[in-house]
Image (cartoon, rainbow, N blue to C red):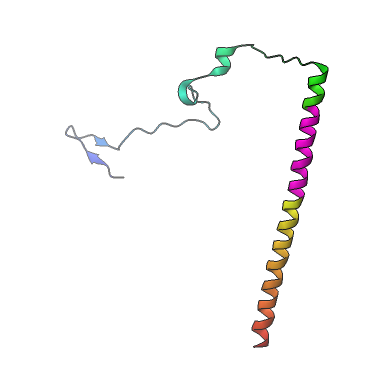
């Protein structure tokens, strides 16, 4: 950054630098919209029949069981892949040292 003399003889050190403390909140929200202040103390209550609640709970339980099964299968596939990659590297080292 260069310091230039202005016509009146004073030095111009460039643009003014503003300093703000860490953690200081900005005045405006992203996009300029603050839904929290617009909605206030609004709340939503959902009431279901006992039958519907049981149906939803069983559906969530089924989805949870499927996700858990798929996650276990994914972990096993990853373990097999890592094991094969490790064996391939060890075989490569053995072939290099035997040559």
Magenta region, mostly helix, strand or loop? helix
53, above or below 97, in the image: above
In the picture as drawn, the residue positioned furthest to the left comes out as 7
Please name the residue shown 67% across and 72% down the image.
89
Please name the residue shown 74% across and 42% down the image.
67
Q: Quadrant of the N terminus?
A: top left
Quarter of image, res 42 = top right
Please name the residue shown 72% across and 52% down the image.
74
Quarter of image, res 22 = top right
Residue 89 versus residue 34: which sits nearer the camera? 89
Is residue 62 in the magenta section? yes
Is residue 82 in the magenta section? no
Residue 19 versus residue 8: which sits nearer the camera? 19
Please name the residue shown 75% across and 36% down the image.
63
Report whether 44 appears left or right of 37: right
| Residue 55 spot, x, y in % from top left | 79, 25
In the picture as drawn, the residue positioned furthest to the top comes out as 41
| Residue 10 spot, x, y in % from top left | 23, 34
| Residue 38 spot, x, y in % from top left | 55, 13
Q: Which residues are magenta?
A: 57-72
Residue 36 versus residue 75: which sits nearer the camera? 75
Q: Quadrant of the C terminus?
A: bottom right
């Amino acid at each position: 950054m260069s310091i230039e003399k202005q016509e009146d003889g004073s030095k111009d050190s460039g643009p003014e630098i503003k300093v703000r403390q860490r953690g200081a909140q900005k005045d405006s929200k992203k996009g300029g919209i603050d839904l929290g202040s617009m909605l206030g103390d609004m709340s939503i209550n959902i009431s279901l029949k006992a039958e519907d609640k049981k149906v939803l709970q069983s559906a969530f339980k089924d989805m949870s069981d499927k996700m858990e099964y798929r996650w276990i299968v994914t972990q096993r596939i990853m373990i097999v892949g890592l094991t094969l990659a490790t064996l391939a590297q060890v075989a490569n080292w053995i072939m290099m040292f035997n040559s």
